[in-house]
Amino acid sequence: MKKLLVLSALASVLVSTTALADTSGKKIAFSNNYAGNSWRQAMLKSYGAVTQKAVADKVVAAADVFTTADKEVPTQAAQIQNLILQGYDAIVINAASPDALNGAIKQACDAGIVVVSFDGIVTEPCAYRVVVDFKAMGNAEVAQMAKFQPKGGNLLEIRGLAGTSIDDAIHAGILEGVAANPQFKIVSSVTGDWDQTTAQKAVATVLPSLPDIIGVVDQGGDGYGAAQAIAAAGKPRPTIIMGNRQDELQWWKEQKDKDGYTTWSASIAPGVSSLAFWVAQQVLDGRKDIPHDLLVPYLAFTQENFEAALPTIEKGGVASHEYTQDEALAAIKANIK
């Protein structure tokens, strides 16, 4: 009798974890609005590595990638409408706007297409969202800054890609952090597009008109560019929050080796694109218990552990993690209440 109970329990586990439907004939498209920085390139690379294997293993029939030629919402909306006409079963999307694409997203849902947004999420209720608490990350930047610069002072803020949910959320978190730490004051805000070259030019432009700054709060991909601009201007080196890029962490190591420089680094892992793919595949597989909002942690490095991670990051790349299907199932399970 005991043996039968054990076998029955095992069968229940297998039923709950095995496929509910065959997705080998399903086609998934990836709509991406921007590829012009190292994070986006790493995101595409992670997505390709995971999805190419999934296609080869006949988990899905296709996992095609479409990146718009510009960063404009109308271009991505038209792209989504084309994907609907092309008969894709699911669309994974990194969106140019949280709400301006909702009409196109609703059209996809009404056509029976599964939509999973990540990083740049959409607010249309029919879509799924794989999200990092970017507001909490922005808040944490200021909290960490308070540890390194307890007396406070002037901060320079570098924002990301205008109009995206990520930029809005991190900015809101930074403002919240400054409100909780009034010893800090943001004296200027520039747009860096999460790209070191763009950030370097933007910072260089405003530096001559700024008072001395003790810190830089940003969104990732801009820390090294800021450091280069500040050094070129002959300004005192501030505490620059980093964004997990290889060039940023390498610069951090060089500064630490020179005089013990301390800072903090955080970003969403580019490999979250692979998690979004698996969420789409699982919805197509017939799972009904997947919440429309899945929260995943951001990836952070401290003074104690960033050097160990540095050799594992490709030169010019970003610290990341690519999700296996089992890890995606665990992430989904962690979000089911």
Image: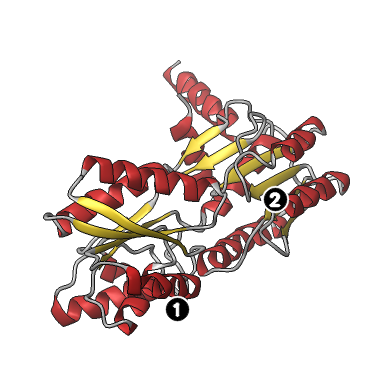
Residue at position x 36%, y 79% in the image: 228
Compared to residue 65, the image places residue 232 above or below, namely: below
Compared to residue 16, the image places residue 30 above or below, namely: below
Whole-angstrom CA distance, mark 1 to mark 2, is 32 Å
The residue wearing badge 1 is 315
Tell me which amino acid carries mark 2.
Answer: Val
Tell me which label, 1 or 2, sits earlier in the chain.
2
Quick check: 235 left or right of 315?
left
Mark 2 lies on a secondary structure that is helix
| Marks 1, 2: nearer the viewer | 2
Could you tell me residue 167's position as x and y percent?
48, 51
Residue at position x 39%, y 70% in the image: 206
Quick check: 7 left or right of 242?
right
Instruction: Report the quarter where the C terminus lies.
Output: top left
The residue wearing badge 2 is 73
The answer to which of 326 and 132 lies nearer the viewer is 132
Q: Residue 189 sits in which quadrant?
A: bottom left
Tell me which amino acid carries mark 1.
Answer: Lys
